[in-house]
Each structure stands twice: as structure tokens, then as C-alpha cells.
């Protein structure tokens, strides 16, 4: 059984991150530092994170050869206790869908840079297991207001803080309308 006091203390540490980020626009480095600090706190206390049974997230990019955003969501997710299976950069829609069918993750974390990637994203969404939520972000979603609707993307997060908020609210026992913004 999880110690309620420690669990509450961990959630408070996450809320403290949000409070800090309200005063400035966080940089990639700020997110990575927060993830490092949260991970160290959990490790020092042998704490499981937000869930007693951690969810699984598969991550990938289809059109991003750098993966800076992907690194941020992987580190933040791992800091909260999510198990990560990284497929890596520049993956084909087929390889992403195949991995998701085999692993049946709770989430597929995807960063999308190019506006002409909408057919690829829609193809991935069509092939996802019904229990997998596509949690995506990147310029294609940020600058094309209709990209998420056209592709059937389930959850769009605009930055690391929005991604952490999504994770804090997620509960696999709750039936989720797969087309809600974070």
C-alpha cells in the first residue's frame, strides 16, 4: 500500500513545478532539470510516482531528427513513474503502429513538426489499440488549429507543463473521451 503522506508530498512537488513555471516560460533545460530533481526525489524515497501500477508510454517522432521535445516528455513522464519504451527518431507510421499493437501502451507520445505529416498521423491513429491514447505536440499542432481534428489526435499538449498536467489528471479507470484537449 502506498504511503498517502508520501504520495501527497510527491503531488505537491509536481504542483510546485507548475507554480514555479507560472512566473516564466520554461525552457527545455528547465523541464529537464525538474525531471531530474523529481526522479532523484523518487529514487531517494523508493517512491513509485503517481501510480502504484505505472502506465506504459511508447514514444517516437515521424518527422523530427532532433527529438528535443520527445526527450522532454520522456524525462517528465519517467519522473512521474510512467514506463517508457522509446522507438526513437524518424520512425515510420507502420513501425509505430506495429509497436503499439504489440505493446498495448496506455499512451503513444508523438512529436510532429511538419504540417504535411497529417496523413501519417491519421494512419497511426487508425491503427492504435482502442486503449491507447495518442498524446501529441509540436509545431504542426501549435500552428494548425485543425491538425488534431483532421488526424484524430486524442490529446494535444502545448508544452511540458501541459503534459505534466495531463499525467496528473489521467486515471485509466475513467472512461476518456479520446478527443479532448489537455
Image (cartoon, grey):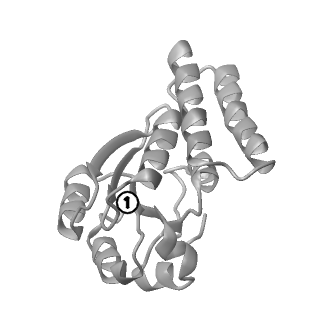
**Residue 33 picture quarter:** top right
- Please identify the quadrant where the C terminus is shown: bottom right
**Residue at point 54%, 49% (across, down):** 171
Measured as percent of width and height from the top left, residue 85 is found at 30, 44
**Residue 98 picture quarter:** bottom left
Judged from this view, the residue extending furthest toward the right is: 23
**Residue 96 picture quarter:** bottom left
**Residue at point 53%, 82% (across, down):** 144
| Local SS, label 1 | loop
Query: As displayed, is residue 22 above or below residue 54?
Result: below
- Seen in the image, is 174 located left or right of residue 151? right
Q: Which residue is mark 1?
A: 132
Report crowding for label 1: few under 14, some 14 to 19, many 20 or more residues within 10 A (C-alpha): many
- Please identify the quadrant where the N terminus is shown: top right
Measured as percent of width and height from the top left, residue 55 is found at 42, 43
Query: In the rendered picture of this protein, how many numbered marks are placed on residues?
Result: 1
Front residue (pair 71, 169): 71
- Seen in the image, is 141 located left or right of residue 161? left
> Visible in this render: residue 42?
yes
Query: As displayed, is residue 151 above or below residue 10?
Result: below
Measured as percent of width and height from the top left, residue 18 is found at 72, 44
- Seen in the image, is 99 located left or right of residue 30? left
Front residue (pair 4, 163): 163
Front residue (pair 7, 91): 91
> Visible in this render: residue 50?
no
**Residue at point 21%, 55% (across, down):** 99
**Residue at point 76%, 41% (across, down):** 20
Query: As displayed, is residue 76 above or below residue 106?
Result: above
- Seen in the image, is 17 located left or right of residue 76? right
Measured as percent of width and height from the top left, residue 59 is found at 35, 52
Judged from this view, the residue extending furthest toward the top is: 44
Amino acid at each position: 500500500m502506498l504511503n498517502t503522506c508520501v504520495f501527497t508530498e510527491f503531488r505537491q512537488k509536481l504542483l510546485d513545478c507548475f507554480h514555479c513555471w507560472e512566473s516564466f516560460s520554461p525552457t527545455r533545460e528547465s523541464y529537464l532539470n525538474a525531471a531530474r530533481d523529481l526522479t532523484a526525489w523518487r529514487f531517494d524515497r523508493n517512491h513509485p510516482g503517481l501510480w502504484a501500477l505505472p502506465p506504459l508510454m511508447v514514444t517516437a517522432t515521424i518527422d523530427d531528427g532532433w527529438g528535443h521535445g520527445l526527450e522532454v516528455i520522456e524525462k517528465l513522464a519517467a519522473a512521474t513513474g510512467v514506463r517508457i519504451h522509446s522507438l526513437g527518431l524518424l520512425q515510420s507510421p507502420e513501425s509505430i503502429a506495429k509497436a503499439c499493437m504489440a505493446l498495448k501502451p496506455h499512451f503513444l507520445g508523438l512529436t510532429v513538426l511538419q504540417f504535411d505529416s497529417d496523413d501519417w498521423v491519421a494512419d497511426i491513429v487508425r491503427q492504435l489499440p482502442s486503449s491507447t491514447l495518442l498524446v501529441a505536440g509540436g509545431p504542426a499542432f501549435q500552428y494548425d488549429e485543425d491538425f488534431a481534428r483532421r488526424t484524430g489526435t486524442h490529446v494535444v499538449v502545448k508544452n511540458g507543463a501541459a503534459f505534466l498536467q495531463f499525467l496528473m489528471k489521467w486515471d485509466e479507470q475513467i472512461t476518456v473521451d479520446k478527443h479532448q484537449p489537455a
